[in-house]
Image: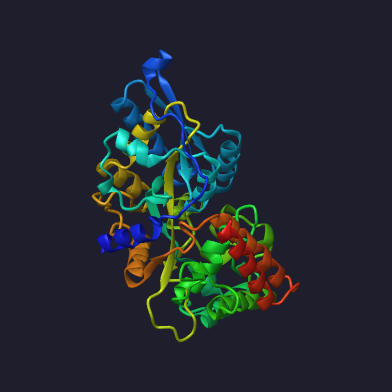
Amino acid sequence: MRKKFLAGLAAAAAVTLAVSGCSAGGTTASSAASSGGDVTLEFAQWWEPELPQGSLRALMDKFESENPGIKVKLISGPYASTKEQVVAGAAAGTMSDVVGLDGAWVNDFVKQGSLANLTDLMKSASFDESQLAAQVKLDGSTYMIPVANFVYPMFVNEDLLKAANVSAVPSNRTEFAAAAAAVTKTGKASGWVLPLDTATPNGIQNDVMSWVWASGGSMLKDGQPNLAGNTDVKDVMTFIKGMYDAGSIAKGTFTMKEQDKVNEFTNGRVGMMIDSLAHVNLIREQNKDLKFSVAAIPAADGYSGKRGMPYASWGIGVANNSAHQAEAFKLVAFLMGKDVNATLCNSAHAFPGNTQSVPDFVNADPIFKQAFEIYQAGTATNEFTGLPVAEDLMRSFDEQFQKYLAGKQSVDDALTASQSAWETSFKG
């Protein structure tokens, strides 16, 4: 079953796209000796705040002990702020030596020439890439390696549902809308939370298209945009608008980021959310009294097929501007090693990026056991992974979707405008 997941992930993530005019040149060799002292690598990521305290630093200490002359400085922050920092660094040529990456960022960074070619670095280091579960490639070369992989189930505040007299966790859209309305009517919380901030538009991927995938639908046809006239996507949009108009969605959705969503749920102000398993530890640390569980994302009424479950990866890459690319790749290789990768994924409660790693968390915790059972019954799905300018696609859809929710255009007009924007992005 683990192999099934990894095989599916590899097929989804290792999409090779033809990118014209992109360059990822730059030096691939550096040494501590050349600078006459220790090399200090900056490692920018959002992982440390989402891991048990001290766990990532402990791995860095282990790396340093095994690689004398190389030090690691962790640059840590929430996902949104890390993204802003990495984007700014890419534009200015000041990106940290090693960077945590979201697959949606890779295409843009490669076009800018901001990421080093990991295929070249792997060859130089004689790294065995057969151990990798997946690689994110552009024009035949690897620029991101998924280190840890997370699924996105539905989180449920059990006490809020009980207070709203919701006897069972919703399994279809009608039940979900009714449960969200019931929770909202208690006056204690909102039924659902939907982050649609256009600066970080991953809510379109995780919180909107996830409903399409949960019912076996798709936003693509033959690898191309398929939005205008797509009843699967249209039905999800009208379903969400119904809840929005009913007041069942937490206020501030147009400016809300993913971390805001997690905060709302953690503080007991939201009954249900779709979120990454990576946040389970964070939620527990911040609210030890919160009683919650996870479940499959509700499907369209009457749907009986396999349910798609969105997933995302903690990806890793090396900056093209780094003067220490060889040392930087040593850190990448360290994190992808069998035992270290298993340790990291156990701490994060994620599926490993090394095919030989075997995490032991699945049966040790009821929340993660639930999530794994949901995964086993469904299919890991993320149609944005590997698409050109994936974040721009989310943003252009987000802008049209917000206009629809606000009553400024029809659902068909929103889909037609999104289709046009996506076709332009694919051609560019």
The residue depicted at 65 percent of the width and 56 percent of the height is 198
Q: Residue 345 location in percent, x, y? A: 34, 49
Q: Residue 195 location in percent, x, y? A: 61, 60
* Viewer can see residue 188: no
How many discs appear?
Answer: 0
198 vs 406, left or right, is left
**Which residue is most to the bottom?**
302
**Which residue is most to the front?**
21
* Viewer can see residue 359: yes
Task: For the N terminus, give its image quadrant.
Answer: bottom left
User: Height in image: 86 above or below 381?
Assistant: above
- State the residue in front, 407 or 245: 407
The quadrant where residue 98 appears: top left
- State the residue in front, 96 or 270: 96
User: Height in image: 26 above or below 145?
Assistant: above
Q: How is the image coloured?
A: rainbow
The residue depicted at 38 percent of the width and 55 percent of the height is 14
- State the residue in front, 26 or 106: 26
Task: For the C terminus, give its image quadrant.
Answer: bottom right
Q: Residue 143 location in percent, x, y? A: 42, 44
Q: Residue 44 location in percent, x, y? A: 49, 37
**Which residue is most to the top?**
36
The residue depicted at 46 percent of the width and 35 percent of the height is 25
The residue depicted at 40 percent of the width and 32 percent of the height is 328
User: Height in image: 234 above or below 65?
Assistant: below
